Amino acid sequence: MDNTPLSRAHLETLSTTDLVQLADDHGIDIPEGLNRRFIIGELLEMAEEARSDESDAGLLAEGEFAVNLEVLPETYNENQITLLLRDPGWVFVCWDFQTNLYTALTGNHHFESFFLRVNSLSTAKPAAVIDFFDVDVGPHDRKWYVHLSGHAPVCRVDLYCRNSQEKEELLVRSRELNLPSTCCGDNPLSAKNRRPPLVELSGLGELRKNHFRNHRQSFD
Amino acid sequence: MADASLIFVLDAALPYIRHPETPGCVEETRLFNAISHTYLPLLRACTALETEAVPFKLAIAFAPTLCEMLADPLLQTRYIETLDRAIDFGLAELDRNADSPEIREMLKVHLDQLQLNRRDFVEIYDRNILKKFDYFANRGYLEILATTATSCFLPLYTDIPEAINAQIETGLLIYRKHFTAIPSGFWLPAMAWAQGLESILKSYGFQYTILESHSLLFSDSVPDTGVFSPVSCENGFTVFARDTLACADVASREAGYHAHPEYLDVDRDIGFEFDEKRLSALFDVSLGRRVTGFRYWARGDGAADSRTLYEPSKAHNRSSADAARFLDRRGEILAKASAAVEGKPVTAVCAFPASLFGQDWYEGVAWLESVYRLAGTRNDFSFSLPANRFPLKVQGGKTVNPCYSSWTESGYAEEVLNNANDWMYPYIRKAVKRMIDLAERFPDDTGLKERSLNMAARELLLAQSMEWFLMMNDSSSMEYARKRFEASVRAFTVVYESLGSNFISTEWLTCTEKAHNLFHEINYRVFRKKK
């Protein structure tokens, strides 16, 4: 195959037969009787695509992996905390440390522990802390399930380090998580207001019993 | 006649399982069983109903992963091979059981079904059953709901809307590939709902979804109509609530119709009972024992040593009786509901996993067909599609704010977020954030880089499949789930690292693409932030 770069000037110099042959060489199917202008257009478009591919491939070239990915990493080496809602009564918290910081904190002989501060927030902007409680976690812990005992509309969990000499140190703060407002909170066995007939017909009584059985910590 | 309607919705979901390197692997049989016991019988039932002009309406949400597997030539071929082996095995068993007329009768029933399945799959549907479902949708019998690309538990990603957008956009892309309708309804995997999803779904043009009943009944704005009317969220997006009591009549583990002693005991399959030698003609036992479809015993009283031979005619009569019982009960409830709203439209929605029909409950499809036949003779209510009922809200201007919920047993996220599977979240969430970053950094890339990014996006969507998280709760499947999840996260990470180092192995890329032969149309830019 002729390796001359495909430019319009060069292609215009070729006979129609040569153009058809060239297109065929490049795997372009040319219907019989196609105008040479279109054949040139097809060839130029193909050349443009090839150049574009080469340019990208230049940034991402054939090669072997630089990293061993047999095992997923134990840490992403960042201070980070995630908060996920499991059900209206429980949230899942998981966190990670920047390795140097973790080593420095735990290597300090005044180091005592890490702890999670579970904050109940108001819906006001900016949110105000209404209440909080702390949960001590081990230096090797990276996750915890936290029970939300109150009925706050918003929750946030902060990871702190406790040191015998200094004030507690905030390491990372989670996003603010909106907690679902549900009306299942009163005990189904207690007296309650009458509901509209279709709500009762929908099986609310049975639902509340099941909910109480499975999620009684969410009830008052 | 009161304006009362019943809506049936099926969740047709399966995780993407395809192992070209391991013919006969046990995991692929999930698809084959679904085709044999649910989808082909369902198509036969629909065809019979259409032929006999029996009105029927059914909504189905086909998971894009299932669509891609159903359209995959390799899996289609393997399905036919599985059927052929089963037919040969059945014929050999007929000879072997020459002295057991009752077993021979059961074998003949299974053989008839196998041969029917083979004929339908190969000759009638030309190996792709989706086309026939699309046909019924175009004729107005079925409504095919859109859903996410993989069965992602969306409430756990509401803080990363790009992840939800990517699931929805890719799901839509695959929907358009397999079906011709324009979906107005959206099926949420596991019906999992959290506040905020209504805005995202509405932004894609969807008009309604279906939620578990406590999503409305436990909300701070319980609609007076309970679950018997669709209701609007504040932004106008409509939600239906599932009629949990109606569904429990059918599917409750202990008391549902499917648990009746006369029905086939689907758990007592010869694949788990016969010795290795006898099964060797059917499958390689070293690759794992599995459901074969050959079952001879009725459920009986449920005792482990109960051995009551299955009697198809008795089971058939039972399914007809259960269909009548179901309709009578619904008629009674809908009449009460209708009276309570003074004749305004009432609707009850029954949503089930499609696997209930045929796989978990062998007679389930026959029951469904009976339900439609008997309903056609009633004048107190009729079957509808969600698309026809969503505008019929009785609530007037009152809106609802549905609460966090799902249709899992816990009603929330306990099954997908517990000590067995919570280790997966740091990886998947990190990968999602990295993918968004990649999509932002390389918005216009083409060639090898685009191909790599598309593969990363595909693997990420696969890693989000809820099934891996659920399978981690079961010791028999957790190893496979872990392997699949880790493989997808690793593949994603290889691309991520490669884009940093500027080197990638095209051989590895091609190999991974071939193994996960789905979502060819994927565009990694679906992970970009919406400006």
Image (tube, rainbow, N blue to C red):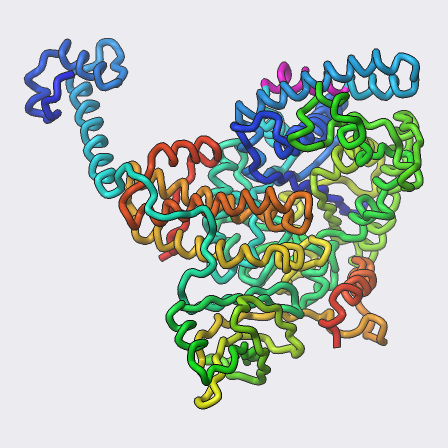
Instruction: Give the extent of the magenta segment.
Output: B113-126
Residue B18 to residue B341: above or below: above
Q: Residue at x 37, y 45 (%)?
A: B495
Q: Position of residue B322 (x, y in %)?
A: 88, 38
* Secondary structure predominantly adopted by residues drawn in magenta: helix
B140 left or right of A119 in image: right
Q: Nearer the viewer, residue B247 or B49?
A: B247
Q: Quadrant of residue B306?
A: top right
Q: Position of residue B390 (x, y in %)?
A: 64, 49
Quadrant the N terminus of chain B occupies: top right
Measured from the top left, where is residue B471 in percent x and y? Answer: 64, 47
Foreground of the two, B267 or A161: A161
Is-magenta flag for residue B95?
no
Does residue A179 appear left or right of residue B505 in this picture?
right
Left or right: B16 as drawn, with respect to A22: right
Is residue B220 among what the camera can see?
no
Residue A152 placement: quadrant: bottom right
In the image, what residue occupies the spot 65% across and 43% down? B477
Residue B524: give x, y in percent of width and height.
Answer: 39, 45
Whether B106 is drawn above or below B419: the answer is: above
Q: Is residue B3 left or right of residue B20?
A: right
Looking at the rendered structure, the number of numbered marks drawn on it comes to: 0
* Quarter of the figure with residue B224: bottom right
> Image point 55% across, 59% down: which residue?
B156
Position of the C terminus of chain B, as image quadrant, is bottom left
> B218 or B139, which lies in front?
B218
